[in-house]
Image (tube, helix red, strand yellow):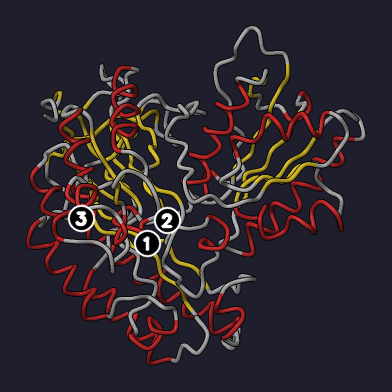
Amino acid sequence: MEKVIDESLQGSSLKTKSRKKNVRKLYIESYGCQMNFSDSEIVASILADEGFNTTSELEEADLVLVNTCSIREKAETTVRKRLEKFNAVKKSRPHLKVGVLGCMAERLKSQFLEEEKIVDMVVGPDAYKDLPNLVREIDEGRNAVNVILSKEETYGDVAPVRLNSNGVTAFVSITRGCDNMCTFCVVPFTRGRERSRDPRSVIKEVNELWEKGYKEVTLLGQNVDSYLWYGGGLKKDFDKASEIQKATSVDFAGLLSLVAEAQPGMRIRFSTSNPQDMTLDVVKTMAKYKNICNYIHLPVQSGSDRVLKAMNRLHTREEYMKLITDIRKILPDCGISQDMIAGFPGETEEDHQDTLSLMEFVKYDFGFMFAYSERPGTLAARKLEDDIPEAVKKRRLQEIIRMQQKHSLYRTRQHVGKIEEVLVEGPSKKSDAHWMGRTSGNTVVVFPKEQYEVGQFVNVKINDCTSATLLGEAVGMAENTA
């Protein structure tokens, strides 16, 4: 499983439209990947029916929830510091209750509730529908916990509240859980087995978003390429399905087609892909529909076959490179990004050089790069010695980052002089006189506002660039994506 972690969003509190009849206040803070932020929207929707409006002011909250991530040690450390802060606020608001949601919940439930006594409630990622009961438990003065992992729950019947939304882009979850046992990853243990959401509920949510004015959706899953709907149930049990179920099953390429055809004026993205599961059917589907964005996040983690095997990545360097070559043939202008881990246990200097040479071959548009951090409970933590010195990890990570910066600038320069279709998402962070949006390939574009508005597709001539941003000027409205 790969996780794309947007550092700018970490710890942000979520706020949505209030219901007049609701009198209690929910403060919810999210950490980690897009799945966690999407889950927070589901939680807010469930608790809105229980009398809670969201607030961005901690001091006025009746219930504080932290949606947590276990992918890196830094995230866990940050969450612990936030829990200390929330408990300090409790001194002036004795009725305040604090709960932990998500990936840390299952792993650290005993520590949080019984040993450290820093929370009132612990809720795992498959137990959010039990929140009304759990809230009643803590209202009556008892600790509450539900971290049971489900084989069926997809939250397909819960309409998420769109929190802190720009009203233009939204996430739509299509799978939960993960069957890939990458040795560095905790997700199979914290989110359970892989199961897919009914495509009809996905289409229904996409249609409702279009009706509300949204112009882009990202289909979200731990591993979207593994999407497989055959009437419900775990992916691993597909071989036990009836012949009719198998014949009428929907894979990810099929779901992409359904979504693209349902709303031809809406941009479609997806995240995250796994090299071992991605098929060329998906890439060909992307090429077939103009409204499916030309962008694939395709984590590799290492360029060394030896390290990939130690990570239990079920693809080789050669297979990954062939997949990249095939994608480029079908979609020559496709934006491709990566996840990379520096200093995995046992990584030699030769292994590191293999990673750099793979990056040179692909020349990614951008990436998410980390030094290896041992996560308790993972196979790597149990079986592999974290034997790479921190100084070596940091040096290798810096070399990876420098190479990625070089390649990012190479890729953005290829846009200069071209006219790109950009979906306007909101004001630029650096200038209120400029709009910010993205190309189909997911590159950020900044241009003067003029008469254009949020949610419009605008043709922008690219005049200049940095390694991360395209700078241009609007030359007119883009045609409808259909």
Mark sitting on residue 413: 3
- Asked whether 159 or 214 is in front, the reply is 159
Q: Residues within 10 Å of mark 1 (few under 14, many from 20)?
A: few
* SS for callout 2: loop
Q: Amino acid at mark 3?
A: Arg
- The count of marks equals 3
User: Residue at label 1?
Assistant: 236
Question: Which quadrant of the figure has residue 427?
Answer: top left
Q: Quadrant of the C terminus?
A: top left
156 sits left or right of 39 in the view: left
Percent across and percent down for residue 460 are 18, 34
* SS for callout 3: helix
Q: Amino acid at mark 2?
A: Glu
Mark sitting on residue 273: none
Spatial CA span between label 3 and label 1 = 44 Å
* SS for callout 1: helix
Question: Which quadrant of the figure has residue 357?
Answer: bottom left
- CB under 8 Å between callouts 2 and 1? yes
Percent across and percent down for residue 187 are 52, 61
Is residue 395 positioned above or below 348 on the image? above
Q: Residue at x 50, y 26 (%)?
A: 161
65 sits left or right of 276 in the view: right
Percent across and percent down for residue 96 are 83, 31
Q: Nearer the viewer, mark 3 or mark 1?
A: 1
Q: Nearer the viewer, mark 2 or mark 1?
A: 1
Mark sitting on residue 194: 2
Q: Residues within 10 Å of mark 2 (few under 14, many from 20)?
A: many
